[in-house]
Amino acid sequence: MRIAVLGLGTVGRHVVEALDSERELFRSRLGEELEVTRILVRDREKERPAGLDGRITYDPSAILADPSIEIVVELLGGLEPARTLIEQALRAGKSVVTANKEVIARSGPALSRSATPGADLLFEAAVAGGIPIIRSLQESLAGNRLEAIYGIVNGTTNYILSRMQQGGGGFADALDEARRLGYAEADPSDDLDAVDAVRKIAILASLAFGGWVDVDAVAKEGIRGITEDDMAEAKRLGGVIKLIARAEATQDGLSLGVSPTLIPLGHPLADVPGAQNAVYVRGEPIGELLFQGPGAGGPATSSAVIGDIIDAARSRRTGGRSVDLPREPAPLVPLGQHAHAYYLRLRLRNETGALALVAQAFASAGIGLSSVRQPMSASGESIVSLVTAPTRRGQLDEARLRLRRSPTLLAEESLILAELEPMDAPSAR
Ligand code: NAP
Ligand code: HSE
């Protein structure tokens, strides 16, 4: 069976290498050989690995118009031209395997509808790298009523936060290292500002709860503001800071968001190191499940891509696997409906009564404080870290506005969720 690979970067290189070197293994599993006959790239000046013997092309039509190619593996990244090439391949009756969460989150259902019967669209690698979470939600857990998903779904940010937590250097160094190791997106803002994690939780929630999630409606907060001071304070409070993507089924609809979150030590999501990902799923009748493993990088991602290629190849010979994607939009709960505890770190003018003013601003908004600490006070200014009692986001923003109007507040340094689950916990649907 002939395959074309679009893209020969971090992931594409590993996929082509594995398909070339493990031909015999895949033949024995499939009863037929998988052969990469074309590889699409863009940069004519770039040096390519040896052994690609004339398979490189710069022209997508050399792939799309070739009827002998049955599977197209899209590993370009970005919305366009990836989306158009996927659509053209599906319309031409080719099965498509992609790791592109941006394309799937934005256009998954429309693309799957554009496919000629017998052509599959598979995207296991789009969420959580090597962890088989897409197929688990689409197939193995299809008999459940799912209630909640909490995940560490971005390897780059988990790598940065884990390094900072271990005192292994500052933010910038950790980001450079994550880029060097091939974890980061072409534009790492997508990782740091939680854009990538939003795409992933939107895909997971769409598959788990039914209805397709609009990525633009998901609340998000990235990790740029997190400092080593926050890490030290989190440790003092008995936890660690992780970028958590949440999706909860409530009676009123789906509640979704991505934000840095204080996770208590001992919780399974607190112990996810480096670029690993983890996805916690709760539902009935299954109860609780935790998927954990390598979430980014060429080898982990190529494992999921190759699994999909083998699946696509099998289904082309047996008549198509065709798992439908939800068509209707998912009903989302307005942001801030649930109460959470929040951690804030504030920089105040170092003057008598400053702490009392902070407490007053929160009290006036009806918010109690469960912890207040003043870890540093130097000439002219002091740092105060506090944890609120469970409060709705609207109330919290009211207190923050009061503080901002007060000359006592010099800056709000950090704002993160201080617990995983909302206090008025959502009930099963
Ligand atoms: P990458 O290293 O930036 O590689 C991209 C490849 O695509 C390069 O070979 C590039 O060509 C080629 N390309 C890009 N635009 C093109 C165009 N318009 N025409 C022809 N070729 C083009 O990207 P990556 O890290 O492998 O990621 C690929 C996809 O997998 C993305 O969707 C990413 O989000 C996803 N993903 C990545 C990871 C990871 O850990 N890296 C994990 C899961 C999913 P040149 O070589 O000529 O520059
Ligand atoms: N940039 C992504 C991450 C790649 O760091 O998780 C895997 O999707």
Image (cartoon, rainbow, N blue to C red):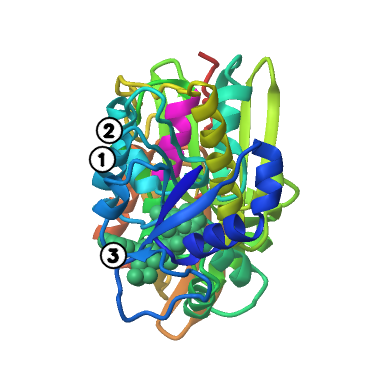
Nearest to the observer: residue 75 or residue 92: 92
How many C-alpha atoms fall within 10 Å of the one at disc 3: few (<14), some, or many (≥20)?
Answer: some
The secondary structure making up most of the magenta span is helix
Q: Position of residue 34 (x, y in %)?
A: 56, 47
Query: Disc 2 designates what residue?
Result: 91
Image vertical order of residue 411 relative to residue 266, above or below: below
Residue 344: horizontal and vertical position, in percent? Answer: 46, 57
- Ligand 1: does it lie within 8 Å of the C-beta at label 3? yes
What amino acid is at disc 1? Gln
The reply to whether callout 1 and callout 3 are in contact (CB within 8 Å) is no
Q: CA distance from mark 1 to mark 3?
A: 17 Å
Judged from the image, the secondary structure of the residue bearing numbered disc 2 is helix
- Of helix, strand and loop, which one carries label 3? loop
Q: Are marks 3 and 2 in contact (CB under 8 Å)?
A: no
Corner quadrant of residue 336: top left
Q: Specify the amino acid type for callout 3.
A: Tyr
Amino acid type shown at disc 2: Arg
The residue beneath circle 1 is: 88
Q: Residue visible at 40% across and 24% down?
A: 325
How packed mark 1 is, by other alpha carbons closer than 10 Å (few <14, some 14-19, many 20 or more), is some
- Do the numbered discs 1 and 2 sit on residues whose CB atoms are within 8 Å? yes
Q: Residue at x 30, y 23 (%)?
A: 329
Q: Secondary structure at mark 1?
A: helix
